Image (cartoon, coloured by chain):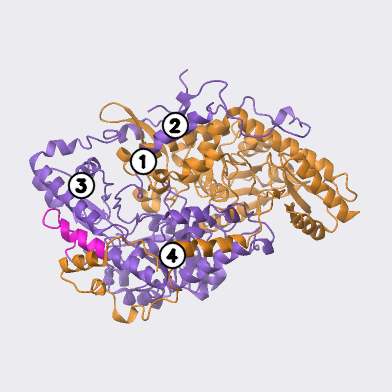
């Protein structure tokens, strides 16, 4: 029923006539007859816009939207300012292609140039690309950047996000290189094990900060060990934490990557998200993906173009640094608007509130009999507690509209962002108490 | 225009968050950054006006004609945006318990069913976030398949030289040796070259059909048969699926796996370069090798990014499919092909098509002779089109046609727009004969003159730094 073909039936006939044809099927004369779809596809009848809206709204209504979210583990429920939703919805930003034609894409190009700068300001690194798919694929691309002829092995901390580890493993499997997991001890990367594993075939070491369990790693020390052994140091960082936490640059990282979702993107059942990637001046030409650079036009005015394209697939083909073509441009724009709207103080405030609220929640939860912190190191906005009868506790929370922490082997992985109030956390804790006491 | 950093003033900010209502916790000194992130300091109106100004310097497909070949710039329906913004979709944590995400599951299952039907495949993943990401996933399926059979010697992937650059780049990322085979002059597979390349070291073939010059390869069944007989698998690059939806299916052409660009064929917006979604479909025998999330699903599978992929893109694509339905899907493709042929026909007589025969959803103009005659290049023509408010076609692709301009009007342009576009091309053609110098310097009425790309590459400035 629905259609986005604007030409009237008369116009379509006129076009066919101009071509000397009587039916559109004559356009498919090169397709072997036996291959043509007979009797139409097995799809339902089309719908009106109203019908589509009704059907899709009905699906959305089958999901439960929890009013309070105390779960993170790679997807975080932060407050999204109104302007962060409206700017990327502007139809030109929304419906443009990759800015191949600089003369009619300065808006996109400049916004990416600004994004690259803000990612550098946040991470302390020298250069950023225009984005990759998400934090996990960013980690995999970073691992590839580190490889050299005699150094091909990737080390990754066991305390990294399981999806990141698995994605890095997959990319390594693709390239025929090895990934080795550095064990964790007490919820943090084991420095002794790392030291032993830093053999002379290791290209890079990936550390997540804060790690999957929320623990703050001794990044500088671990990074220095990697460097000492001649390996590169990759940090996977939470961008909100960088409002207050030491930057990857300050920790000595060669490459900083991360999941950009906390910078203004909704959880949205896992995507679209944003992979950010930044590195040092020295490694600039190893970065995969689009990079926007400044130049001047024929009139001598400052302008922006897609630059350093000699690294990319459409030029280098099988010798390209990556096959990436489309990235997450609109998510990068979203992150830029978020960072610009929040500013240095706003993002520091968001980070400080995450930290304080997570510590408040941890303290309150630990007042409940049988609940205690599993790992005792410093943490940012996630932490693991023991939890007797965790299924029952989580269900009771859910029944009250609260998505509790993520059940994992060690207990429950909780998260608190700036978005949750003291009252919401107190209510959650009282429900936990009720179930267990 | 000024950069956002040049509009920053100390002390400006918006009050977006509540005050912290719990006791402040101090981060130990050794973990603190030395200085606050030096982000720009702006009030809300500064941010709003800045991006509004930038937005006036962007050309979107919903704004005007965008015949960028191989990119399928079709209209992005508004209702799909509204649907993708429903809190019932945006507010869902990917690790929420299964009973609470039944709507998301239904979206994925329904989209999978329809897209499998359209592609002729049996199973599908939505984890890949873009077309090239889908290619990576698809070729990893091929790799796992051979490995699972202990067939270790299959180390080569065959790619025609007319292919998109992502194909050879993907094969290389998956650890395969790339065997480039020469295409026939019409961009179709040279059967003899294919036969010569096939052997017991062939892992597979990557192919686009219609091919990258916009022609349907009529030998497709023989091609896929030959690859299968040699023990290889066939990967269908879905870049050009918009020509054939509901008319012919990759699965029926003999392909074993494919990616579909939801951001092209299924009308989800490109967003200035993403996010997209590269749904990967496969035949049943490859289904055990599809990627899964280690955290969301289970360990032991490949994985190409976190969670379930770009879910909101799948939501939009499903909304599009529900609207089009059984008749609308082939109607879209047949009209895409009709529009391309009509536009090619209307332009003919000025600029000449590289292949003077019925095309699929896109066609290539060969400006080789025109350039010899006028001194005006394909680049000059493209830049002149900008002055007429039209986004230029894809330039210098495919590589097998020199001075190529590739046009893909899509089905969502009316005859009126195509007539206007043909008229613009005629005017540009005449201009080239009257004043070629003027065209060498085009565009004249755009946001900027031609940028110095050599300078950008030689002295890279890829971020703003405040003056010392």
Q: Does dot 1 land on a helix, a strand or a loop?
A: loop
**Residue bounds of the magenta highlight:** B338-356
> Label 3 is found on which chain of the structure?
B
Task: Determine whether B161 is above or below A137 in the image.
Answer: below
Label 2 sits on residue: B50
Q: Does dot 2 land on a helix, a strand or a loop?
A: helix
Chain in purple, by letter, is: B
Mark closer to the chain start, 2 or 1 = 2
Q: Nearer the viewer, residue A187 or B315?
A: B315
Label 3 sits on residue: B378
- Quarter of the picture holding the N terminus of chain B: top left
Q: In this rendering, which labeled residue sits more in front, label 3 or label 4?
A: 4
What is the number of the mark on residue A48?
A: 4
Q: Is residue A437 left or right of residue B159?
A: right
The reply to whether discs 3 and 2 touch (Cβ–Cβ < 8 Å) is: no
Q: In this rendering, which labeled residue sits more in front, label 3 or label 1?
A: 1
Q: CA distance from mark 2 to mark 1?
A: 13 Å
């Amino acid at each position: 029923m629905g259609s986005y073909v604007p030409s009237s039936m008369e116009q379509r006939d006129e076009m066919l006539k101009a071509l000397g044809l009587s039916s559109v099927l004559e356009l498919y004369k090169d397709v072997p007859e036996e291959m043509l779809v007979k009797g139409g596809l097995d799809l339902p009848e089309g719908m009106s816009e109203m019908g589509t809206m009704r059907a899709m709204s009905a699906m959305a209504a089958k999901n439960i939207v929890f009013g309070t979210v105390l779960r993170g583990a790679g997807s975080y429920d932060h407050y999204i300012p109104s302007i962060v939703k409206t700017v990327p919805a502007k139809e030109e930003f929304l419906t443009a292609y990759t800015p191949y034609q600089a003369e009619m894409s300065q808006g996109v190009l400049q916004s990416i140039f600004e994004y690259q700068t803000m990612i550098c300001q946040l991470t302390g690194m020298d250069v950023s690309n225009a984005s990759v798919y998400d934090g996990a694929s960013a980690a995999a691309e970073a691992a590839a950047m580190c490889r050299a002829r005699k150094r091909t092995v990737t080390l990754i901390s066991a305390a990294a996000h399981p999806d990141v580890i698995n994605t890095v493993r997959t990319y390594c499997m693709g390239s025929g290189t090895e990934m080795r997991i550095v064990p964790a001890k007490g919820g943090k990367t084991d420095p002794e094990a790392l030291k032993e594993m830093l053999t002379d075939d290791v290209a890079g070491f990936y550390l997540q900060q804060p790690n999957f369990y929320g623990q703050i790693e001794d990044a500088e020390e671990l990074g220095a060990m990697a460097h000492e052994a001649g390996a590169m140091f990759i940090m996977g960082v939470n961008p909100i934490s960088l409002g207050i936490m030491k930057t990857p640059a300050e920790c000595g990282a060669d490459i900083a990557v991360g999941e950009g979702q906390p910078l203004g993107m909704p959880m949205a059942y896992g995507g679209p998200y944003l992979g950010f990637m930044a590195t040092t001046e020295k490694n600039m030409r190893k970065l995969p993906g689009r990079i926007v650079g400044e130049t001047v036009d024929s009139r001598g005015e400052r302008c922006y173009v897609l630059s350093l394209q000699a690294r990319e697939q459409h030029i280098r083909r099988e010798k390209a640094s990556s096959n990436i073509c489309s990235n997450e441009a609109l998510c990068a724009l979203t992150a830029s608007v978020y960072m610009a709207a929040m500013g240095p103080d706003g993002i520091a405030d968001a980070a400080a509130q995450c930290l304080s609220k997570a510590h408040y929640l941890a303290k309150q939860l630990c007042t409940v009999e049988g609940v205690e912190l599993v790992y005792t190191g410093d943490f940012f906005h996630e932490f693991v507690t023991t939890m007797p009868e965790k299924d029952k506790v989580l269900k009771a929370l859910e029944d009250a509209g609260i998505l509790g922490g993520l059940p994992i082997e060690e207990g429950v992985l909780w998260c608190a962002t700036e978005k949750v109030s003291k009252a919401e956390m107190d209510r959650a804790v009282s429900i936990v108490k009720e179930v267990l006491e | 225009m000024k950069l956002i950093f040049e509009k920053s003033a100390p002390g400006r900010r918006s009050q977006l968050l509540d005050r912290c209502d719990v006791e402040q916790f101090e981060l130990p000194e050794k973990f603190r950054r030395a200085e606050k992130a030096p982000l720009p300091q702006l009030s809300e109106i500064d941010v709003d006006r800045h991006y509004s100004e930038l937005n006036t310097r962007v050309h979107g497909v919903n704004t005007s004609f965008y015949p960028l070949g191989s990119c399928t710039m079709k209209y992005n329906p508004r209702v799909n945006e509204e649907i993708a913004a429903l809190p019932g979709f945006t507010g869902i944590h990917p690790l929420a318990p299964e009973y609470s995400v039944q709507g998301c599951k239904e979206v994925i299952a329904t989209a999978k069913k329809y897209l499998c039907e359209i592609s002729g495949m049996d199973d599908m993943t939505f984890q890949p976030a873009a077309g090239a990401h889908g290619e990576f996933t698809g070729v990893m399926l091929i790799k796992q398949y051979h490995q699972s059979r202990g067939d270790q010697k299959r180390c080569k992937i065959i790619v025609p030289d007319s292919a998109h650059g992502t194909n050879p780049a993907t094969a290389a990322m998956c650890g395969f040796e790339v065997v480039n085979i020469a295409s026939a002059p019409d961009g179709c597979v040279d059967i003899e070259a294919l036969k010569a390349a096939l052997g017991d070291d062939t892992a597979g073939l990557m192919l686009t059909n219609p091919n990258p010059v916009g022609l349907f390869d009529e030998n497709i069944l023989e091609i896929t048969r030959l690859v299968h007989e040699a023990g290889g698998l066939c990967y269908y690059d879905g870049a050009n699926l918009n020509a054939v939806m509901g008319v012919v299916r990759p699965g029926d052409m003999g392909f074993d796996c494919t990616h579909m660009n939801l951001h092209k064929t299924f009308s989800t917006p490109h967003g200035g370069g993403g996010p997209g979604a590269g749904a990967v479909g496969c035949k049943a025998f490859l289904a055990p090798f599809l990627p899964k999330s280690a955290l969301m699903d289970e360990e032991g599978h490949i994985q190409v990014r976190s969670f379930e992929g770009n879910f909101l893109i799948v939501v939009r694509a499903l909304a599009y499919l529900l609207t089009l339905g059984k008749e609308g899907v082939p109607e879209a493709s047949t009209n895409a092909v009709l529009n391309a042929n009509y536009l090619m026909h209307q332009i003919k007589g000025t600029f000449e098509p590289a292949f003077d025969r019925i095309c699929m959803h896109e066609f290539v103009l060969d400006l080789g002779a025109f350039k010899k005659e006028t001194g005006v290049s394909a680049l000059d023509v493209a830049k002149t089109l900008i002055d007429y408010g039209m986004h230029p076609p894809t330039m210098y692709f495919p590589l097998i046609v020199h001075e190529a301009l590739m046009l893909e009007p899509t089905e969502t342009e009316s005859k009126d727009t195509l007539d206007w576009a043909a008229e613009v091309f005629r005017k540009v053609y005449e201009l080239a004969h009257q004043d070629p110098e003027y065209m060498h310097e085009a565009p004249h009425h755009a946001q900027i003159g031609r940028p110095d790309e050599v300078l950008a590459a030689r002295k890279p400035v890829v971020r703003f730094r405040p003056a010392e």
